[in-house]
Image (spheres, rainbow, N blue to C red):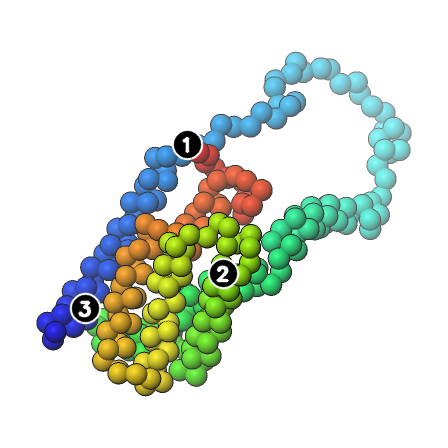
Amino acid sequence: MAQFVAFIKGPMVWIAFGVFFAGLIIQGWRFFTMSRKKDPAYIPGTEKKKKKKKKKKSKKTKAKKKKPKTIMDRLQPLIAFADKRWDNLENSMFRIHPLVSVVTIIFHVFLFVIPILLLAHNELFRAAFGFSLPSLSDQTTDMMTIIFLLCGGFFLFRRIFVRRVRAITTWWDFVMLAVTLTPFITGFMAFRQWGDYPTVMLVHMISGELMLILIPFTKLGHMIYFFLYRVLIGSEYSFGQGKRAW
C-alpha cells in the first residue's frame, strides 16, 4: 500500500500531466488535419473594372456636396454596431436561459481558478520548483469551492429532473460530472478534516490525475478547445471571422 501511495504522489502526477499536454497537442493537430482553410468569400463589385474618365467637377458643385456632419451622422456607426450586438444578444443563451448562462460561467471559471490559485497546491509547486503562482486565501477558495459544488449540483439537478435535458443525457455524462466534482469534494473534505484524512487525500489525488488524463480525449476537453474552435471556425457563435471550416 505504501508503494502504491508513493506512486500516486510521485510518478503518476508526471504521467497525468504528460498525457494531458500530449493529448492537447495531438487533438490540436487532429483539428487542423480534419479541417481546411476557408475559401475566400466572393464579394460583389471587387472584380476589376475599366477605368472611366471622370469629368472634372466645378468648385461650386464640390462645395454643395460637402455638408457639415451632424452629431447623429457621427454616432451612426456606433448606433449600427449597438443594434447588431443587441440582435445577437436577443438570440443568445443569456437572453433565453440567463440563469443557466450565469451558472455555467461561474462553474467553468472556478474550475480553472481554484486549483491554480489554491494555496496548498502552490506550496507543493514551490517545494518542487522553487517558485509558485499567486495564491488566494484559504477562506476565499473554501467559499469558491462551495459555490462551485452548488453549480455542479445545479447541473446534476437539470440532468435528472429537466425533461429536455434528461432526453439527451447518457450515463457517460454522469460519469464526466462525477470525475469533475470528485477532486473538489475530496479537497473540501480534506481541508475541513472530514473522514479519514489519508484516504480522502488519496482519492483526491487519484481523481485529480484521472481528470487531467481524460480532459484531452473526452467532453471535458471543451473547456480548452472552446476557444480554439470559436476563433478558428466561422459561425454565428464565433468570437471573430473563422479561418477554417470542416
Q: Answer yes or no: do the residues labelled 1 and 3 have beta carbons within 8 Å?
A: no
Task: Say above or below: 173 vs 131.
Answer: above
* Residue drawn at (45%, 36%) of the image: 244
Residue 107 visible in the current orientation: no
The quadrant in which residue 101 appears is: bottom right
Q: Quadrant of residue 6?
A: bottom left
Q: Amino acid at mark 1?
A: Arg
Task: Pick the quarter of the image with the N terminus.
Answer: bottom left
Amino acid type at image mark 2:
Ile
The picture places residue 240, in percent across and down from the top left corner, at: 54, 44
Residue at the spot 60% in from the left edge and 53% down from the top edge = 93
Task: Provide the secondary structure element on which disc 1 rests.
Answer: strand
Of the image marks 2 and 3, the number of the one nearer the N terminus: 3
Q: Nearer the viewer, residue 78 or 177?
A: 177
The residue that label 3 is drawn on is 8
| Residue 106: % across, % down | 51, 66
What residue is pinned by disc 1? 36
Q: Is residue 6 left or right of residue 224?
A: left
Q: Which mark is residue 77?
A: none
Q: Can residue 190 be seen by looking at this rendering?
A: yes
Please determine whether, in this image, residue 161 is positioned above or below residue 244: below
Q: In this image, 170 relative to 76: left or right?
A: left
Task: Answer left or right for 121 relative to 114.
Answer: left
Q: Quadrant of the C terminus?
A: top left
Residue 214: image location, x then y, percent: 31, 55
Mark 3 residue type: Ile
Q: Relative to the observer, which residue lies in front, 8 or 34?
A: 8
Label 2, on which residue? 160
Q: Earlier in the sequence, mark 1 or mark 2?
A: 1
Residue lying at the far bottom in this picture: please name it.
Answer: 193
Label 1 CA crowd tier, 10 Å (few <14, some 14–19, many 20+): few
Classify mark 3: residues with Cα within 10 Å, few (<14), some (14-19) or many (20+): some
